[in-house]
Image (cartoon, rainbow, N blue to C red):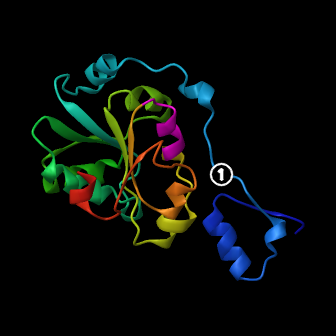
Amino acid sequence: ARAVVVITQGLKDFYVQRGISQEKIIVAHDGVDVRVFADQESKEDARKRLGLPLDKKIALYIGRVDGWKGANVFFEAANFFPSDIIAVVIGGEKKQVNILRQKYPKVIFLGYRPYRELQHNQAAGDVLVLPNTGKDGISALFTSPLKLFSYMTSGRPIVASDLQSVREILNEDLCFFVQPDDPYALA
């Protein structure tokens, strides 16, 4: 190949360590079409549509609830939230959500919502959370989370795990970094 395109510096480093010339590797991070996110509903309208309280602060996670996404850290962090802050999750398959509701009663699980609602659903949160784990190489080094790019369009504060993969995109001016895999730090 004349060139290899990867989505993170971590992937570029991985391939360079395996003998591919760094001059052949181009890093092109993921992204979103910002035009799709240009028009979002108000926080109040989003919360009414989703059946969420208007009088609480909402820490919102949107996405898969798989282990390497660190979602379980967010679920556990809800145990440390003050009473005026609630954890809300949009995502997960029906069977997963039913199990998670039992295991984490302090979290509101809304289940899967269609992608076409994403920009409006993000509006419901006071803060958007990206709790990726540092225990998985994909999460720590190789991912370029689409969730992060959509979060960036929302105008909401972002709290994210302090990982190389996230720091390729954000810095302290754009995000609040927390120690990965630490529910108390996340809270």
Front residue (pair 3, 63): 3
Q: Where is residue 135 in the image (x, y as percent from the top left)?
A: 40, 72
Expressed as whole percent of the image width and height from the top left, the position of residue 163 reads 46, 62
Residue 59 located left or right of residue 116 = left
Return the residue at label 1: 29
Residue at point 50% right, 37% down?
152
Which residue extends farthest left? 83
The amino acid pointed to by label 1 is His
Number of numbered discs overlaid on the protein picture: 1
Depth order, front residue of 104/127:
127
Check disc 1 and report its element: helix, strand or loop.
loop
Residue at image point 57% right, 65% down: 142
> Magenta segment, principal secondary structure?
helix
Query: In this image, 26 relative to 158: left or right?
Result: right
Asked whether residue 151 is drawn in magenta, I would say yes
Q: Residue furthest bottom?
A: 18
Q: Position of residue 169 (x, y in %)?
A: 56, 50
Residue beneath the point at 46% across and 30% down: 154
Label 1 Cα neighbours within 10 Å, binned few <14 / some 14-19 / many ≥20: some
In the image, farthest residue toward the right: 2
Residue plotted at (69% across, 68% down): 12
Please tell me in which quadrant of the rendered image residue 72 appears. bottom left
| Residue 10 position (above or below residue 96) | below
Q: Is residue 26 above or below residue 118?
A: below
Q: Going by the image, does 96 lie left or right of 29?
A: left
On whether residue 57 falls in the magenta region, the answer is no
**Is 145 located above or below residue 47 in the figure?**
below
Where the N terminus falls, by quadrant? bottom right
Q: What stretch is highlighted in magenta?
A: 148-155
- Image location (x, y in percent) of residue 74: 27, 53
